[in-house]
Image (tube, helix red, strand yellow):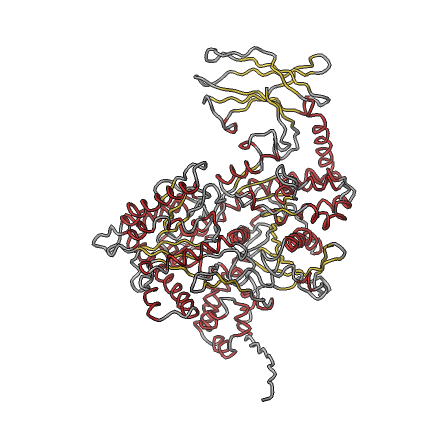
């Protein structure tokens, strides 16, 4: 038989003139948080909408033209279409609200660099929490019209698709995306040609194509090396997210950091603030310093000018989670670079050195080349301060420059439509402008209990429909029987969603302890198998393809779920993505989280559940450590960190079992004549009231503006004025201080008083050997606390000494008169550290001496 030749033909529909703006809607990720826009596409062809996985741009290339023609004549569709366009135009025609943000002016532009961005499943350039957080940051920046651009990489394959076989093995598959199907377009120059930039690699230059995605008001520029100008090896650089070996990773980070700077220059975008979300983008700081050196600055001055405009956010609480590269690899890729910076190899390598490793550490580089640094929760701030303490060697961790801004979630994206509709009716549409107003959200109490419960049940039913579809497909592919599928889906019943449902969905990393609830299977059986009070436990999540222990956790969940008594009561759902996440956080009754304290930097999935009326049951780590108020869910106090890991897991799992058995299940099934638990509704309402105004991305972005962006912009302008005069001054001053500090010392001249009467002053007097420094170069300080044996220096009151003259040729005298304002036993310290009025943080040099 003759071999056949297969030919491909794509026929794209012509969009009627009346509906031409569907293309505009499909190319703006505003649809990722506007459900009415997504519903508009679904109405045209619901089956195709599912087939293209809710991708509007792909949908418009495949929808039957006859459906478009019919829709253009359908009054109902046109009414919905016009309503969506009205909302779209209203959102995008709003005045530049940043003019109303004190400190943010017309010249300002924030550039936000991140390795991944998660907006919607139709743009698969994300893997998990970091990307979703970055996406929410961009959406909230758009909502307040902040002058903001984002920079990332456009991955041909993105992250992997997950399936789970009958033995619980995770199967990772990658799909090459057709960029014509994604909501991105090439960036063009004025002459109509595509923007191209390049980055020098060893022995070659790698060309980069720049694409743009639009997120409301915010443009996201995505860099792509998969273009004909590059070798096959270099085309693969932007192929996979978190794929490849260390060489591939450093090349990706060079493309993001250095290529991102070149791309912004090519588009004539001139940021006044630069934000590196994690250390992946830290090479961006080196590229900017190189530009300033080319302008004539020496490297120390260029470093100060760059650092003062830079914000660095770290998201990991695990030291090993910070990217680092071997010294030889850095030499290979950066030999020409440090020559262009005008520094030695040793000086360059020192930018990324740490005390315990000779590798070049990206977090070290980011900290040394930024002046504003933050963790992503209060607990994580303390952890990060400890991890990074060697960067400020003479400063106690609680006083070093690490700050924090707790993460938040984009409420319009993750708040279920049912709640949106209810709030419009019960609270007025004004709620959209009250997202951070705690008093306003107290009105949730007025929602009738039966209405609240009805919405919760509706959301659970919708979740069950989605889960059943996925599990059915999973069962068919794994050659499961129909009888087994019936048993599997027994409790996930959308018609009768009255089973208490617990959800655990996140990355399967060992520190997240997905299997903690399996510590005592006999106790778990007792909890789940009660015929009068059934409990359903749902798991979902991916493990990195190289994370074998994480994949073993998935197998363990599959193994337990397959035990005859647990079939249908423990479900493992494959293919965790944003679409499934939205279903789960809105539908489950209780959201579980069981990390090893204090390794959960923040976490945001519990926030998404909380704003939808689900209750959190979690270890008091990350955001929940500050979000739990004692009554808005359940918190488990972590066991002391020095306890044996097996004992820790046993103790904390016992707390989970006890709370589930004694409190959660009891409260949920305490139903009166109305058929639901009024106590549960009260607790769920309080959870929404307490969490919704505190953990939105709007609050998070407002804090970045007030804490960092305004300061970075103002300080950056001061440093660059008059030919970078202040940058040069600060760099020279720091060089002088570092040279002299080894010879600086402080001693006390007065005799310490141990007792005095209230109102009686103490006169302190110290002598400081300045070793060539001037009195104005140092800050001599009294720290005093009423609480004796206080250990945290950030809780002391501070008082400054004045220089009152010289003592001979070598020392200066500093004095302070202080009258304690409280009675009782107190403690105090005396110290000296270098200071300059133009420093961003008074202790940024990390130098300090104590009496």
In terms of depth relative to the viewer, which is nearer, 604 or 45? 604
Of the 4 image quadrants, the one containing the N terminus is bottom right
In the image, is 517 to the left or to the right of 12? left
Report the label total. 0
Q: Is residue 709 left or right of residue 537?
A: right
The C terminus: image quadrant: top right
From where the camera sits, is residue 626 visible? Answer: no
Q: Nearer the viewer, residue 644 or 282?
A: 644
Q: At which x and y percent is residue 311? A: 60, 43
Q: Is residue 318 visible?
A: yes
In the picture as drawn, the residue positioned furthest to the bottom comes out as 1
Residue 838, compared with residue 11, is above or below; it is above
**Image quarter of residue 223:** bottom right
| Identity of the residue drawn at 51% across and 15% down | 819
Residue 632 placement: quadrant: top left
Residue 382, position in %: x, y?
51, 37
Please tell me which residue lies in front, 411 or 517: 517
Q: Give x and y (percent) for residue 236.
A: 65, 62
The image quadrant of residue 724 is top right
Q: Is residue 829 above or below residue 518?
A: above
Task: Give the image location of residue 743, x and y in percent.
Answer: 69, 22
């Amino acid at each position: 038989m003759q071999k056949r030749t297969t030919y491909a033909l794509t026929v794209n529909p012509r969009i009627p003139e009346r509906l031409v703006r569907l293309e505009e809607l499909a190319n703006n990720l505003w649809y990722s948080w506007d459900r009415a826009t997504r519903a508009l596409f679904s109405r045209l062809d619901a089956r195709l909408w599912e087939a293209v996985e809710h991708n509007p741009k792909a949908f418009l290339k495949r929808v039957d033209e006859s459906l478009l023609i019919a829709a253009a004549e359908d009054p109902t569709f046109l009414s919905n279409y016009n309503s969506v366009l009205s909302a779209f135009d209203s959102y995008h025609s709003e005045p530049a609200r940043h003019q109303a943000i004190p400190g943010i002016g017309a010249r300002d532009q924030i550039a936000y660099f991140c390795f991944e961005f998660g907006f919607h499943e139709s743009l698969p350039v994300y893997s998990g929490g970091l990307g979703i957080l970055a996406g929410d940051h961009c959406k909230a920046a758009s909502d307040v019209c902040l002058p903001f651009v984002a920079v990332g990489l456009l991955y041909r394959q993105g992250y992997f698709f997950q399936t789970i076989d009958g033995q619980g093995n995770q199967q990772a598959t990658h799909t090459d995306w057709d960029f014509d199907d994604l909501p991105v377009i090439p960036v063009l120059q004025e002459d109509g040609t595509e923007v191209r930039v390049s980055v020098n690699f060893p022995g070659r230059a790698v060309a980069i194509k720049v694409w743009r995605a639009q997120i409301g008001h915010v443009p996201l520029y995505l860099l792509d090396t998969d273009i004909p100008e590059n070798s096959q090896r270099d085309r693969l650089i932007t192929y996979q997210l978190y794929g490849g070996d260390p060489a591939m990773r450093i090349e990706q980070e060079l493309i993001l950091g250095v290529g991102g700077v070149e791309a912004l220059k090519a588009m004539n975008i001139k940021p006044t603030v630069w934000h590196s979300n994690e250390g992946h983008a830290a090479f961006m700081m080196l590229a900017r310093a190189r530009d300033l050196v080319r302008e004539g600055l020496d490297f120390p001055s260029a470093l100060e000018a760059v650092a003062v405009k830079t914000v660095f956010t770290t998201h990991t609480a695990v030291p090993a989670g910070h990217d680092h590269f071997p010294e030889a690899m850095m030499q290979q890729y950066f030999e020409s670079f440090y020559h262009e910076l005008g520094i030695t190899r040793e000086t360059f390598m020192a930018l990324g050195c740490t005390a315990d490793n000779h590798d070049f550490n990206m977090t070290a580089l980011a900290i040394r080349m930024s002046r504003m640094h933050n963790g992503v929760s209060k607990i994580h701030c303390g952890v990060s301060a400890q991890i990074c303490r060697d960067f400020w060697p003479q400063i106690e961790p609680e006083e070093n420059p690490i700050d924090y801004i707790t993460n938040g979630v984009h409420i319009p994206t993750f708040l279920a439509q049912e709640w949106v509709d209810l709030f419009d009716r019960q609270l007025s549409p004004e709620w959209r402008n009250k997202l951070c107003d705690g008093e306003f959200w107290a009105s949730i109490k007025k929602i009738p209990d039966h209405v609240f419960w009805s919405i919760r049940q509706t959301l659970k039913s919708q979740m069950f429909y989605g889960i059943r579809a996925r599990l059915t497909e999973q069962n068919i592919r794994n050659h499961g029987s129909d009888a087994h599928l019936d048993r599997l889906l027994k409790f996930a019943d959308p018609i009768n969603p009255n089973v208490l449902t617990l959800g655990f969905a996140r990355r399967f990393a060992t520190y997240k302890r997905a299997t903690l609830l399996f510590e005592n299977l006999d106790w778990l059986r007792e909890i789940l198998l009660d015929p009068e009070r059934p409990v359903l436990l749902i798991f979902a999540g991916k493990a990195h393809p190289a994370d074998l222990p994480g994949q073993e956790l998935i197998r363990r969940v599959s193994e337990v779920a397959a035990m005859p008594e647990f079939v249908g009561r423990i479900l493992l759902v494959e293919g965790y993505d944003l679409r499934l996440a939205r279903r789960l956080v809105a539908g489950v009754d209780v959201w579980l989280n069981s990390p090893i304290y204090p390794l959960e930097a923040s976490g945001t999935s519990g926030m998404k559940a909380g704003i939808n009326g689900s209750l959190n049951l979690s270890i008091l780590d990350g955001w929940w450590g500050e979000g739990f108020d004692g009554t808005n869910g359940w918190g488990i106090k972590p066991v002391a960190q020095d306890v044996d890991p097996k004992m820790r897991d046993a103790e904390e799992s016992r707390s989970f079992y006890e709370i589930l058995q004694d409190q959660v299940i009891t409260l949920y099934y305490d139903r009166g004549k109305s058929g639901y638990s009024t106590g549960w509704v009260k607790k769920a309402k309080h959870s929404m009231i307490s969490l919704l105004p505190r953990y939105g991305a709007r609050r998070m972005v407002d804090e970045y503006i007030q804490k960092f962006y305004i300061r970075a912009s103002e300080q950056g302008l001061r440093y660059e004025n008059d030919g970078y005069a202040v940058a040069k001054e600060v760099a020279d001053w720091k060089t002088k201080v570092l040279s002299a500090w080894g010879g600086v010392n402080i001693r006390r001249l007065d005799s310490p008083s141990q007792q005095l009467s209230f109102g009686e002053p103490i006169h302190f007097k110290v002598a400081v050997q300045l070793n060539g420094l001037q009195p104005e170069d140092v800050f001599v300080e009294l720290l005093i606390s009423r609480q004796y044996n206080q250990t945290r220096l950030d809780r002391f009151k501070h008082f400054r000494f004045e220089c009152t003259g010289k003592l001979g040729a070598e020392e200066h005298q500093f004095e302070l008169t202080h009258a304690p304002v409280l009675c009782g036993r107190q403690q105090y310290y005396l110290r000296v550290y270098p200071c300059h009025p133009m420093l961003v943080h008074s202790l940024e040099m990390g130098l300090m001496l104590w009496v």
